[in-house]
Amino acid sequence: MKKFLLLIVIPLAFLSCGKQGDAVPSVPVNFQASLFDPRILPLNASGGYVVISGYGVAGLILYRTPDRRYVAYDRCSSYQPQNKCAVTIDGSGFTATDPCSGSKFSLTDGTPVKAPATKSLRAYYVTTNSSEIFVSN
């Protein structure tokens, strides 16, 4: 009986090991701007955000969290990323929505807050000094 169970369990284990879904492609990102640049000024306020085109897969979202940290995400939705659907910031300024699927993501940490997405937005490293912000991967 134990051998029979092993013959059933082992193939099932191999069948369950597969591709866990596509991820947002990793592309080189190297963005730098002055914190006094008019495009970046909204980041001075907690909950402030800016959208930067031309970086990442579908552009960047730079966000200032309520605890005053800077975070950066690729605008490409993590749900079916091959579609390269760019998320848009909601009116509240706390979430972003994938207009293709309706998925919503928290801007504080990039996690999905509304299905069908199950993966977070691709996050990038953010560093700052007294006058500049740097985003990279």
Image (cartoon, grey):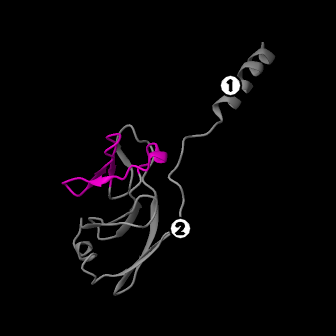
85 drawn magenta: yes
Q: Which numbered tag is attached to residue 28?
A: 2
Percent across and percent down for residue 38 are 24, 79
- Residue at (41%, 41%) from the top-left corner? 117
- Residue at (35%, 70%) from the top-left corner? 70
Q: Is mark 1 on a helix, strand or loop?
A: helix
Is the residue 49 above or below the residue 4 in the image? Answer: below
Q: Quadrant of the N terminus?
A: top right
79 drawn magenta: yes
Q: In which quarter of the image is residue 36?
A: bottom left
**What stretch of residues is rendered in magenta?**
77-106
Percent across and percent down for residue 90 are 23, 53
Percent across and percent down for residue 66 are 26, 65
- Residue at (33%, 46%) from the top-left corner? 98
Q: Residue furthest bottom?
A: 130
Which of the two labelled residues, at mark 1 and mark 2, occupies the earlier sequence position? 1
Mark 1 and mark 2: Cα distance apart in space: 38 Å
Question: Would you say the magenta stretch is mainly helix, strand or loop?
Answer: loop
At label 1, the amino acid type is: Leu
Q: CB atoms at circles 1 and 2 under 8 Å apart?
A: no
